[in-house]
Each structure stands twice: as structure tokens, then as C-alpha cells.
Amino acid sequence: MGEHIKHATSRSELRERIISVAAELFSASGIKCVTMDEIAASLGISKRTLYEVFSDKETLLEACILREQRETDAFVVEIIKKSENVLEVLLKLYLRGIEKFHATNKSFFEDIKKYPKACELLKCDNNRNHEDAINFFKQGVSQGIFRDDVNFAIIGLLVRKQLDVLMETDLCDRYSFLEVYESIMFTFLRGISTEKGAAELEIFIHDYRKRQLSVEEEKKQ
């Protein structure tokens, strides 16, 4: 019995290690460029062992997406506990989004279209996030943070489309990813905010810009 539990635990640990390494490689290089051989080599295991845990690349990719969803859900639960209002929650999610998008190779979003099951999984999560966001915005209205004359379902879809364009065009060849992403999100948030919300948003943007400048100065030194 003890040996069986030990084996199950070690296999579970191996599974999590594989997901962790694969997610990092997919994010850094895109999906197409990363082979199962490369993932196995990065882990120091045989390809046979890798295939015993994950039957193919798409199954592994799905596991990576599901893990990211769980981590995001846990992150949201924690920041809701620590935040005073909905805008604070959205801004913390925004910062996390910047980090994630900035660390992800643009080709990842193009490559994933070639994996139907994984792509559908991502699409379902995006739809769920869209519904959650609308509920957040409605809470923001009751808190006096967001305007009450906005159709958040329409606005939310428009922002998603803008982010899709960001991934599918050469816009980031002319401007930095960060600059484009900020332009989309800050313009959106300014447009839906009340005076109270706008004041809080400007404080956040001011502090955020200062942090960015500090990071850039540190890089130059």
C-alpha cells in the first residue's frame, strides 16, 4: 500500500514538473517550435517516460492551459480579499496580464489555432472571463467607480477584439507590446470610469509609470 502511494505521488510530481517546464517552453518559443524531445531533454527524462504521462503534445498543452486557469482563479480570489474596490481588482489583474502577455511569444497565439481541443479550452475560458468581467463592472457601478450608462457586454467584446488584433497584426513591430497593451487598457478604463474611478485610475497610472521608469533606469546601470 505504501509503495503504491509513493509511486502515485512521484508520478503526480513528475506530471506537474512536465507541465511547468512545457508551459515555460511554449510561452517562450511558441508551441510549434517546441518538440516533445526538447521537453523530455529539458526535464532530463526519456521521451518514452514523457509519453507515458502525456500521450501527445496537445494533451500536454491542454494541461498547461488548465493549470494557468487554476492559478488565475486562485489569484483573483486572493486579490478580492485584499482589495477595497473592483477597480483595484481589475488593475491588479491588468498588471498580471501585462506580465503574462509580455512573457509570451506572439507565435503562441497563432500556433494554438492548430490544436482544436486546446484552442476550444482557451476560448471557453475567455468566455467565462468575459462574463466574470461584466459582473465586476456591475459591482463597480454600485461602488460609484464605473459609469451606469455603459453596456459592458459590448465594450468588453470590443476590448477583446482589440487584443486579438494586437496578437494578429504587425503593430508590435512598430510599437512595443507594452505601449500598445497600455493604450488599449488605459483608454478603455478611462472611458468607463466615473470621476471617482478616474481619480483612482490616474493615481495608479502615475505610480505605475514611476515604477516603469525605475525599472528602465536599473536596466541601464
Image (tube, grey):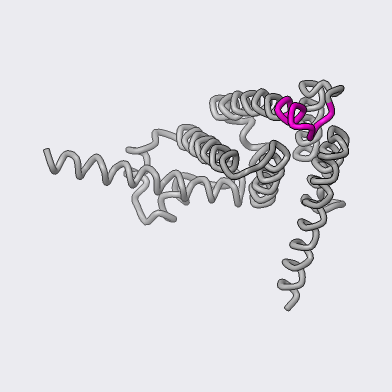
Q: Is residue 211 left or right of residue 116?
A: right
Q: Is residue 57 visible?
A: no
Pick the quarter of the image with the N terminus: top left
Q: Position of residue 66 (x, y in %)?
A: 50, 34
Q: Residue at x 75, y 68 (%)?
A: 214
Q: Position of residue 209 (x, y in %)?
A: 80, 58
| Residue placed most toward the observer, 7 or 182 | 182
Q: Residue at x 13, y 42 (%)?
A: 2
Q: Is residue 178 left or right of residue 31?
A: right
Say if the magenta span includes residue 85.
no
Q: Position of residue 46 (x, y in %)?
A: 34, 50
Q: Residue furthest bottom?
A: 221
Residue 116 quadrant: top right
* Residue 154 drawn above or below residue 213: above
| Residue placed most toward the observer, 172 or 136 | 136
Pick the quarter of the image with the C terminus: bottom right
Q: Is residue 116 visible?
A: yes
Q: Position of residue 38 (x, y in %)?
A: 47, 51
Give the total number of marks visible in the rendering.
Answer: 0
Q: Residue furthest left?
A: 1
Residue 199 quadrant: top right
Q: Is residue 188 left or right of residue 119?
A: right
Residues drawn in magenta = 137-147
Residue 198 quadrant: top right
Q: Residue at x 67, y 44 (%)?
A: 97
Say if the magenta span includes residue 139.
yes
